[in-house]
Image (tube, helix red, strand yellow):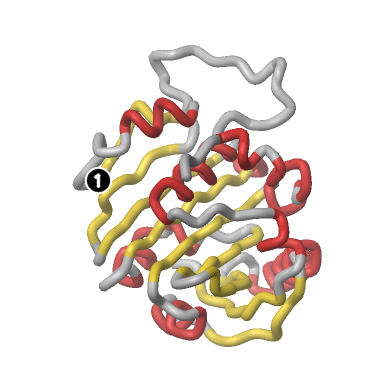
Amino acid sequence: MTANTTDYLWFEERFPDLAEAYCITLVHGVSPVELLRRLGGRAEPAHTGIPELVEAAYDFYAPFSGTRTLFGMTSIGPWTLMVEPNGWHGVNEEKALPASVGTRWISHYDNSNANNDGSFLWAENTDRRLQFDLRGAGYRNGSHPDELLDVIRRLGFEFPEVPTTTDDLDTDLAIPPAFALAEHLTQVRLRPTHLQDTTFVCGSAEIK
């Protein structure tokens, strides 16, 4: 199964409220309950479907003045999917790297409300193997920054030395490639049904 950017054009079309500010994380062999523990979080009421989860997350955010965020989790085979509307625990290395002990941790984040601030993180057993800005793949960090360079180029991430324009596109150049790169690393192809119809186990955690 080859991951392709075009396989994820549905995300911004189907879930525009989530796409505005999201973090998607896949963690191997760690249950939602264990993932919540690793993040130092607490359990919250479950929510079904992304519209309900997004509304709950934004309602949750305000009373805590942005110091605590709500997220949803579900199992996809041996992986736990964590969905954060308006959150970024998955790419926060102070939390993500310690939480990745003994597992593979793949996360991508984007926030159009913060000048398209975005990040991709691949961690293994507390090692940051790869991290880069979704719109600046020419500048990569980590212990294996070039291991996936051919894949990153094939998927169409933006490089500073290669000018690009989104004038004729209906979607951002960065977000679908991020989903495709996550699929390449996990072999998990996310589909709309994973987000639309799922009842998410929910939790919250403090933002460091």
- Residue at which label 1 appears: 142
Q: What residue type is labelled 1?
A: Gly
Tell me if mark 1 has few (under 14), some (14-19) or many (20+) residues whose alpha carbon lies within 10 angstroms of its own.
some
For this orientation, the residue located farthest to the left is 143
Above or below, 162 against 23 in this view is above
Q: What element carries label 1?
A: loop
Task: Give x and y (percent) for residue 165.
Answer: 60, 15
Above or below, 28 against 151 in this view is below
For this orientation, the residue located farthest to the front is 1
Which of the 4 image quadrants contains residue 46?
Answer: bottom right
Front-most of residues 113 and 188:
188
Task: Give x and y (percent) for residue 83.
Answer: 60, 63
Q: Is residue 62 visible?
A: no
Residue drawn at x 49%, y 60% is: 25
Task: Give x and y (percent) for residue 65.
Answer: 64, 68
Residue drawn at x 69%, y 46% is: 11
Q: In the rendered image, which quarter contains the C terminus?
A: bottom left
Above or below, 120 against 139 in this view is below
Front-most of residues 206 and 181:
181
Q: How many labels does the image show?
A: 1
Which of the 4 image quadrants contains residue 202?
Answer: bottom right
Task: Give x and y (percent) for residue 178.
Answer: 51, 42
